[in-house]
Structures are given as structure tokens and as C-alpha cells.
Amino acid sequence: MAIAQESSPGYVRCHQVLGSEQLQLRCPRPTSAQESQVPWLSGYVRCHQILGSEQLQLPSTPPHTDDDILCLPGDIMPALGPVLVPTHLQTELVLRCRKETDCDLCVRVAVHLAVHGHWEEPEDEKKFGGAADPGLEKPRNVSLQAQVVLSFQAYPTARCVLLEVQVPAALVQFGQSVGSVVYDCFEAALGSEVQIWSYTQPRYEKKLNLKQQLPDCRGLEVRNSIQSCWALPWLNVSADGDNARLVLNVSKEQHFSLFLYWKQVQGPPKPWWQKNLTGPQIITLNHTDLVPCLCIQVWPLEPDSFRTNICPFREDPRAHRNLWRAARLRLLTLQSWRLEALCPLPAEAALCWQAPGGDPCQPLVPPLSWENITVNKVLEFPLLEGHPNLCVQVNSWEKLQLQECLWADSLGPLNDDVLLLETRGPQDNRSLCALEPSGCTSLPSRASTMAARLGEYLLQDLQSGQCLQLWNDDLGALWACPMDKYTHKRWALVWLACLLFAAALSLFLLLRKDHAKAAARGRAALLLYSADDSNFERLVGALASALCQLPLRVAVDLWSRRELSAQGPVAWFHAQRRQTLQEGGMVVLLFSPGAVALCSDWLQDGVSAPGAHGPHDAFRASLSCVLPDFLQGRASGRYVAACFDRLLRPDAVPALFRTVPVFSLPSQLPDFLGALQQPSGPPSGRLRERVEQVSRALQPALESYFHPPGTPGPGRGVGPGTGDGT
């Protein structure tokens, strides 16, 4: 980067375009003796030309920053005639040198000025169309004056100066540029971001604004002239296979500090790792740790040393892939959710409808719209109710990056529902269509799709209140209507046609009745747990959803909140336990620290602490009838216990409940699934497939629970590995 270098004291340069000639004048800073002779106006530069005289008075800026004015832009005022206004800002980097090797970086600012507005017509001339009073003629021979403010901000300093400019009448051409004023100059720190504003007092138009990133020592061709750059550790980033290598080429006796952090758009950076080192050093970063906002700061361990910051992975494709791979969508309430990621992301989100069967999730745009999202900020969708088939899609640069069905963990697996879209027009006109993979089918319709054939029944269900309203506004609404009863009717004729074949195989079916029933419906499993917190509930929901992918029929209070509220926890649990055991199912006691504490209180006092758990806690309600089964020896073959690795050790489960198998998940997942299967379970090869299937479904929830986004992952504990010094 080319930078002008000047050894003279600071000055103000004011120049005007006079016809085809350009007049440029420099005014050196006054000495102490000169200061008493110049009529200074506190805190500003006065640049003006006296009309009819060749004398130019151009005193420069006072040498002390204590005289800077206070920047108060004020409101925009109407101009009652032609006025001077700033139209353009230009900057130039210069070095202000006390001697050849002792320089500071400075920003020279040029403010271009133009004439805006026009002379107002006198009121009597406007009204009567005649000549006005000669004493009120337009003052076309009057020069224009303006007070131009320059505001300069570069953390941690800020300055504000006032420039007084006078333009002779001969140069006043409406809408034309009259020249520029150059302020020389504002001192700024290396590598800082500066912002410059310019406006007049009083202010007639919006403020001009200019933002500029100043180079650091790495980007300066004249760094040898700046003493703070001499002792700077030089840092290079290179490839080491898939990983990144940081090479710090400094002398052996040089002490410096290295700081790795995640840069944020707003607020302070998120620290990751910092260490004081002695050069030279080679440090290797694992390729999985690279994200676009990962930055490196390095500085010598000396007083007032300059710090160099570089963010070398902003455009690295691997870094962007890692960022999206680690990003998570988290449901906070029915309507609120959050995108959690280490770095700021340009992204937008919308709701979509995921039907069972593996078809692509269909965006609900319109009637809803794509919304710009901010990372780690709470966002809301205008929903009235949640639904397991509602999912969130996140796009970045018109590419789908994330899709999660946030409500599935709390409301259960995907339902066989159809989504009805209601569109409202003027004069209370409305239309309905059913969302299908082929598009939105109008109702009623003669099309050959399933929704069209069942359109009459769906409209009856909507009118009778059997559909759940998910969203509503002035333009339309969304309804989820159950389809399972119609699906069963659709297959009724098929089953009738197969009766003859079924009769021929009746003997075989009778011999394999129990096994066939289990294979068709799956074994029942009742999952009981203590609602320690919302994060643990999400983990339980993920486990229940994963088990539903197997031939298991899972019951859990998370998915039955309405029945639980209507019946009460005790009645709900008794009904579920009786049905599960009658069908030869299994009751799973999922232990956590909260469950262990609750059982200990119950065993000691015969009752749990009131108010310790919420009104929907089936685990608390179940203790009254679970304990007799264990005390009377009826638990074997009916109950199993489980806990999560790293959350609770199996030997921490109360001794009374260790009379049945206790499994630690996911390390003992094969044995756990084997215990839940029918006595004549699947062969070992099929069981391994199911273990892998459940493990894959459970892994994201475990990572989110034990390693929330924004914390270093496994193996990162002490930061990047350092190689040997070279």
C-alpha cells in the first residue's frame, strides 16, 4: 500500500477551483510565539478568501487536541437560500515523521463541497407578479460561508474539528462543486477501523459517512519507519495435509503471546485458546477446528506492544462446511427457537411440512415467508400449535444447509396427517387446498390424488373441528387433519381380497400368532424418567423417537401431555403400565441424578418432596405402584433400568432397582435393545443393524446435551497441539 511520507509539521490544506486553475495552500502548525498573534477560534480551522483581495487567511489547526469541539449534529433544517454542503469524502494515508525511523500513521481527509438550494422569491413579487422593492434584490453578490464539521472515530480515540469556509460569489453556481477542504491529519492506530462523518452547522442534509480499515504492520510497505512494527512476531499460515500450520518466525529469545478466538459481528470475541510462547514456533490446527471466524492475534510481551490480528479462514470451504456441520437448531418454546453456531452466518429460515414416507420437506412459502435470521438470537414463528411434521429449513446463499423437525422430540414421530392451506380473499372469499408431494390440490377436486378422493371427508373434518389449526392471520390459515382412519378404509378392500389367501394359511398363522402379532405391531415399551430439566427431556425424547424406528411401540409422558392433564399422572401411569404388561411389554426406568434423589427420598420417607417436580411428572406418580413390584419380586422380566454414560454410573442406581438389568447408554446399547426385543428376537446380524440405527439417531442429541455449541469439542481441552520449535 503506497503511503505518502512527510516530515513537516501538521497543516491544513484548503484549495478552491478558480476557473481552470487550482489553488492549493499549506499552513504549517503555529509555534508558541505565533499562537498569541493569531485570533484562534477554539477547536476549528478557518479557511476563507476575502472577495476583492488577493490576501488569503488560512490559520491551521491548533496543536492541542483539548480544543476539539463536541460533535452535536442536531436536526436537519430547511435552507432559506443557497448553502454549502459536503458531497464527498476522500482519504489518504500519510506518515507523520519526527525523524526518518520514528513515524506515526495519519489519515488525511478531503471534503468536497457544492452549492445546494436557490434564492427565495420575495413574497410581494410572488403575490402580485410585479417588481419587488429594490432594497430586497437577491443578494447575488454575497459570498457563501459554511462551518463544516469533521468527526473522526478510531477506537480508542475520537476527534471532532470545525472548518470554516468562505466561497466568493463568483464561484456560486447552483448544484455545482466549488472545491474541497483538506484536513491534514488525524492520527490513528495500525490495523484499526476508522469512521469519518462530515456535515455542516447548521445541518441541511444527511451526514456523509466513510468507513475504512487501516492496514497493520503486515500490510505496510514502510513498516521499517514505524517502531511498533520492529519487534512484531511474523506469522504465516500454510497447509499441513488437511490441517493448518501456523508458523511464527521470530528469534529464539523473543517472548510473545498467541491468542485464538472466534470473531463476532457485535460484542467481544469468544476466546478459545491463549498461551505465552518463545519463538520460533510451529503450531498445528486440526482441520475440524477451522471455521470462518477463527482469528489469530499475536503480540510481543513488551509494554504497549502492537497486536496483529488475522482471520485466515474466512474463504476456506472446509471452514464453512465445519461451521454448518456444528450448527444446531434448538427449540426453546412452542414458538421460539434459536440457531446456535460459533460464527455469524448469512442465513434465512422458513417452515416446511415433512410427510411420512421420505418425500422432500415442502416449504410453506407462501403463505409464510423466508425470514432473515441472526445466529444465537431467539427467533419466533407465528404458530398457534406445534406439530411433529413441522420442520425448519435454513438456507444460506440459496443452498439448504440445515433441516430439523424441532417439535418431533417433544410431540412424537411423524404423523400421517394432511396439511390444508386456507387462502382468504376479499369479501370473505376463501379457498382450500391439500398439500401433497405433487403440489397443493384444490378441495373439492376431481384430480386422481388421494387428497382429492378424500376431499369431501377432509372438509367435513375441518367443519366439525377435528383438524388442528397451526397458523392463522388475515390472509389465510394452516390446518393439520388426521388421515390414518381414511388410510385404513383405503386398504379395506385389499384386505377383503386377501381373505381367501389368509384362510389357506390360517393354520400357519395360528401357530405363529404371538410372533406374527409382535412382528406386525412391535413390542410395547413404557419409558419412565424424572424431568430434571428441559435439556434432559429433549434427550429422553430423542431416545424415544429412536426406539420408535424399531418394531417397538413406545409410550412416554412427553407425547401424551393432553391425556396426562385430563386423567392425572397417577391414573395415566396405571393405565399405561397395565396395558404394557398385559401385552407382554417392558417398563424402562431411565435413571438420572434427579430420579436417584427422588427414589432415595421416597424410600426414606415414603413420599417425595412436594413441588419438586412438575404436574406432568409420571415418574413421581409411578413410584407408588413400581415399588411393590420390586419389593414382592415381580419385577424380573417386566422391568429394565438404564442411564446415560457420563451422566450417571450404573452403581449409583438405588440397590432395590438393581435387581433387574441396568444398562449404561449408549455403551451397552446392544444388550439394552436385546432386552427390549421379543424373547424370539431377530438374529444377531439384524440386531447389529438396529443398534447402529438407534446409535446414529441418538448421537446428535447426546452431543448437543454434553457439548452445547460454543464450547470446545472432545479433544480440544488444552487448545491446538503445538509442534516442536524450529
Image (cartoon, helix red, strand yellow):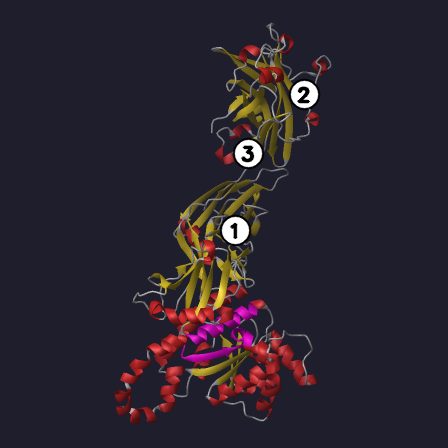
Q: Name the residue rendered at 62%, 27% in the picture.
A: 77
Q: Is residue 421 left or right of residue 175?
A: left
Whether residue 28 is visible here, answered yes or no, is no
Disc 2: CA contacts within 10 A as few (<14), some (14-19) or many (>=20)? many
Residue at 54% over, 73% down: 558
Earlier in the chain: of badge 1 and badge 3, it is 3
Instruction: Confirm whether residue 517 shows in the render.
Output: yes
Q: Which x, y percent locates residue 357?
A: 36, 69
Disc 2 to disc 1, C-alpha distance: 46 Å
Q: Residues within 10 Å of mark 3 (few under 14, many from 20)?
A: many
* Of the pair 680 and 450, the residue shown nearer to us: 450
Dot 2 or dot 3, earlier in sequence: 2
**What residue is shown with label 2?**
62
Look at mark 1 in the image and give the residue it sits on: 374
In magenta segment, residue 550: yes
Q: Secondary structure at mark 3?
A: helix
Is residue 262 found inside the magenta-colored segment of the image? no
Amino acid carrying label 1: it is: Thr
Magenta span: 535-562
Residue 520 in the image, given as x and y percentages of width and height? 37, 83
Which mark is drawn over residue 129?
none
> Can you tell which quarter of the image residue 206 is in?
top right
Where is mark 3, residue-wise? 229
Decide: is 594 above or below 397.
below
